[in-house]
Amino acid sequence: MQRKLLNAVDHCVDEALEGIVSSSGCLSLLRGHRVVVRADLGALRGQVGLVSGGGSGHEPAHTGFIGGGMLSAAVAGGVFASPPPASVLAAILALRDAGASGVLLIVKNYTGDRLNFGLAVEQARNRGVAVDMVIVADDCAFSQPSKAGRRGLCGTVFVHKLAGALAAEGRPLEEIVCQVKEALKNIGTLGVSLSPCSVPGCLPSFDLPPGEMELGLGIHGEPGIKRLKVATADEVVNNMIDHMTNPASQSHLALKSGDSVVLCVNNLGALSRLEMAVVTRAAISCLEGRGVQVARVMSGSFMTSLEMAGVSLSLMKANQEVLRLFDAKTSAPAWPNQSGVRVSGRSYTLDPPAVGPLSGVMANTLEMVCSSLLQRQEELNSLDRASGDGDCGNTHAQAAKAILEWLHSHVVPGCPGQLMSTLAGLVQERMGGSSGALYSLFLTAAAVPLKDHCHPAAWATAMHAGTEAIRRYGGADPGDRTMLDALCPAVEELKRLATVPPGGHMAVLQAAVERSELGAESTRDLIARAGRASYIATERVTLPDPGAVAIATILRAVFQALGGTEAK
């Protein structure tokens, strides 16, 4: 038996109603009945009062939709059981006594509800009450509905809203009934679930093996019209909308390209908010892909089925008048705080703001560096095959791809020190090996002088700090045929940035790049004293060191990105 956090099965509905009403400052209970009404019933004087209801277990329906601009009262039955006619009649008479000009009952199409609410209507008429009833039958599941007709599902909430807005405007009962019946022709709902639910004190309503789902189920725990394999959210939503709009079905919602709709994505009880957001995105995308204009979207729990892990989609075709009524204000607590902005056609992405004056410059520079390393990938591999394991180009390419991927999904921070720290983490994780460790050491040490300063002298200090970290932990020195043979000459030249007059910075950077390239070229004549090349016979190591060439490549790319010219 399903575990539920209740006190006693027999009292759960009454205790739930007490919890709802006692926690709200705008609701009241009719003593002796499971009837919740607006606490300010006097505000209904001269207006049509609205009553809805049905079995419990669908919360927040229907008590959550009581308030100005929506329902005036809700009548609750037992879990998934229709309320008795006496309670429905009590609700009608309470609204009549409050001065309502008439009462409209909004009833879902289930036999018990039709009978009990219908009986209360006849009893109220015998007492002289101006009362009418509309039946909501928005289920799109059955291609050939039985004599009982289509079931009433979450589309009922649309009717609460439209009728409530009309009533709040003081429209007469006959007009409200006429407009609601017209709207009902343009509402459709379909549900799907990954699990059954269980009425308190009972076993689950049906068995559903792992990996399967029910399509076209109702809200009382009954199984659906067909069982399908669990698929992606996009596939499930596409199947649902296909089924809802299939002209071969007698219960389909006629929908064509150019139509405007209100979409309700309703949590049947136990889907996470994350799943609901994914399904909502899928539904909007699917409808727009068919040329349907999504005017409004409401996503959340509106008419549940206890703890069922499922979702229903409700669509309401909407002209300007329907949207006006839909957008009208209401104080009902379960109605979402909707925006009156049309969903389709609205751009919902913004370019991230630049977070510092150097953000764009550093982003462009990084892209140039990565592009240059990727272009020289095979060349660096070839150089490495002569003195190592032949993967120097691949290793640098891994780092370049990781940085480019990061650039496409992040804003470059305006603080160079913060950027250096971020890059240090990236290369450590994605570059790997000794190269990843060396570059991460360099960037980590270089980040410190750049945390609070970004002037040229700070960059020179950062380059020196990074180089010293490589020397300290890597154990190599200039002349050992390593990356330091390209890096150290450049760093020595960059020290002039601290004293160079304004306008001379690019000349210093160019000189540093040229010294780096000369240093890299000189390694072909050096004896390897560090790294894998130190284990290779000297006469076989005749090409430049690939790590040094990579450093020269990086510095040349930086120079070009900052406006320098290519080497002749």
Image: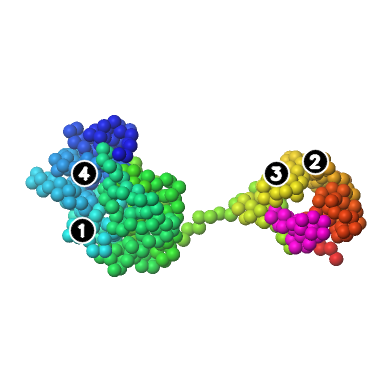
Location of the N terminus by quadrant is top left
Stretch in magenta: 376-400
Residue 525 among those drawn in magenta: no
Tag 4–tag 1 contact (CB < 8 Å): no
Residues packed near mark 3 inside 10 Å, few (<14), some (14 to 19) or many (20 plus): some
Label 3, label 1: how far apart the Cα atoms are: 66 Å
Amino acid on which the number 4 mark rests in the picture: Ala
Secondary structure at badge 3 equals: helix
Indicate the position of residue 243 as horizontal and vertical percent values.
33, 62
- Ranked by sequence position, the earlier of labels 4 and 2 is 4
Indicate the position of residue 365 as horizontal and vertical percent values.
73, 55
Tag 3–tag 1 contact (CB < 8 Å): no
Q: Which residue is mark 4?
A: 81
Label number found at residue 149: 1
Label number found at residue 421: 3
Asked if residue 457 can be seen in this view, the reply is no
Indicate the position of residue 556 as horizontal and vertical percent values.
80, 58
- Ranked by sequence position, the earlier of labels 3 and 4 is 4
Indicate the position of residue 215 as horizontal and vertical percent values.
33, 56
Query: At 70% from the left edge and 49% from the top edge, which residue is drawn?
Result: 432
Q: Is residue 253 left or right of residue 271?
A: left
Of residues 406 and 319, which is closer to you in this image? 406
